[in-house]
Amino acid sequence: MTISQNHNFKDKTIVITGAGGVLCGFLAKQLAKTGAKVALLDLNLESAVKFADEIVAEGGIAKGYQTNVLELESLKATRDAILKDFGTCDILINGAGGNSPKATTDNEFHETNLPENTKSFFELDKAGVEFVFNLNYLGTLLPTQVFAQDMVGKTGANIINISSMNAFTPLTKIPAYSGAKAAISNFTQWLAVHFSHVGIRCNAIAPGFLVSNQNRGLLFDQDGNPTARANKILTNTPMGRFGEPEELVGGILFLMDERYASFVNGVVLPIDGGFSAYSGV
Ligand code: NAD
C-alpha cells in the first residue's frame, strides 16, 4: 500500500493512546507514513518511545509520552507537552484497552458440579471487572475530554475508537471486556451526534481476531496447530483465517481521511473477515 501517495496528513497531529502496544504501535508506524506528526501515548514509556524512535529512524515525525489514560492530570500534562512539540491534536485514536484474567471465567458454560477450584461467573472479581470497564470505557472517555477541546472547529478533526467484534455479540468467558467494548461502540455514536455541530467526526473500528505476539500462544500449540478455541474462531469466521494487523490500516485511513469519509460519522466498522455477520449456519 502506498500510504504516502494516497493520504497526506502533513502538518496534522495524530494522538494515539495505547501506542506502546502491539496494534497501536504498528498503526502509529503506518500512519506516520502520511507525513503526520504522531504522538504515541502509553503507560509504558519505554515501549512508546521505542516505536517513536523507529518512526523517526525511518524519516517520520513522532514522540513517545508516558500517559495514564485513567488520570486527567496525566492526560492534561501530555496535552501540554504535545502542544509545545507538535501543536494541537487533529486526530485522536483511542487505542488503550484490554482484558484481565480476573474478569474472565474458566468455562464457556456454567455447569452443575464444576471442580472446586473453577473460576465460575460467581467467583469473578469485582475489582477485576471494574479494571476492565475503566480501562476500556473511561480510558476512551477521558482522553476524548482532554484532546477534543482543542479539536472543536478544526478542519478535518476526528476521533477513532477501538471497539471489538465482541461488542456486537459477546464472546464467552469475558463479560466485562465484551460489555466495555459494547459501551465504546455506543459512546462512539453518542460522540458523533454530540460533536456534529462543531466539525468533529467520531467513528470506531471493531477488529476481529488478529494474530499478535500476545495471543499467538493461545491460538496455536507448540507445533503451530490451532488450539480448540482457535478452531472455533476459524469455523465462525467465514473467510476462514485470522486477520493481520496490516488489515486494520485501510479502515483507519479511510475513516480519518476527510477526502474519503467527510460524511461518515458514528459508524463502527467491523474488520473481522465476516465474523460479526455470520450466524454460524
Ligand atoms: P496491547 O496490550 O498490546 O496494547 C495496549 C496498550 O495499552 C499497552 O501498551 C498498555 O501499556 C497500554 N495501556 C494499558 N493501560 C493503560 C493506561 N491506563 N494508560 C495508558 N496506556 C495504557 O493490546 P492490543 O492487542 O494492541 O490492543 C489494542 C486495542 O485494540 C485495545 O483497545 C484492544 O482492546 C483492541 N482490540 C484488540 C484485538 C486483538 O486481536 N489484539 C481485537 C479487538 C480489539
Image: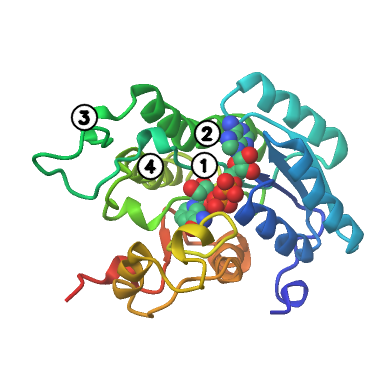
> Which badge, 2 or 4, is on the more N-terminal residue?
2
Q: Is residue 47 above or below residue 270?
A: above
Cα distance in 3D space between marks 3 and 1: 24 Å
* Tag 3 secondary structure: helix
Queried on whether the Cβ of the residue with tag 4 lies below 8 angstroms from ligand 1, the answer reads: yes
CB-based contact (under 8 Å), mark 3 and mark 1: no
Residue 52's spot in the image, x, y percent?
81, 50
Nearer the camera: disc 1 or disc 2:
1
Sequence-wise first label, 2 or 3: 3
What amino acid does circle 1 point to?
A: Gly
Beta carbon at label 2 within 8 Å of ligand 1: yes
Q: Amino acid at mark 4?
A: Tyr
For label 2, the residue is: 139
Q: Is residue 166 above or below residue 274?
A: above
Camera-near label (3 vs 1) is 3
Q: Secondary structure at mark 2?
A: helix
- Residue nearest the observer in this picture, 113 or 215: 113
Q: Residues within 10 Å of mark 1 (few under 14, many from 20)?
A: many
Q: For ligand 1, tell me if the residue under mark 1 lies within 8 Å.
A: yes
Could you tell me how far apart the alpha carbons at marks 2 and 4 are, in whole angstroms?
Answer: 13 Å
* Earlier residue among tags 4 and 1: 1
Residue underneath mark 1 = 97
> Within 10 Å of the Cα at label 2, are there few (<14), some (14-19), or many (20+) other Cα atoms?
many
In three-dimensional space, the C-alpha distance between marks 2 and 3, rounded to whole angstroms, equals 26 Å
**Residue 92 image point, x, y percent:** 62, 45
Q: Which residue is mark 3?
A: 122
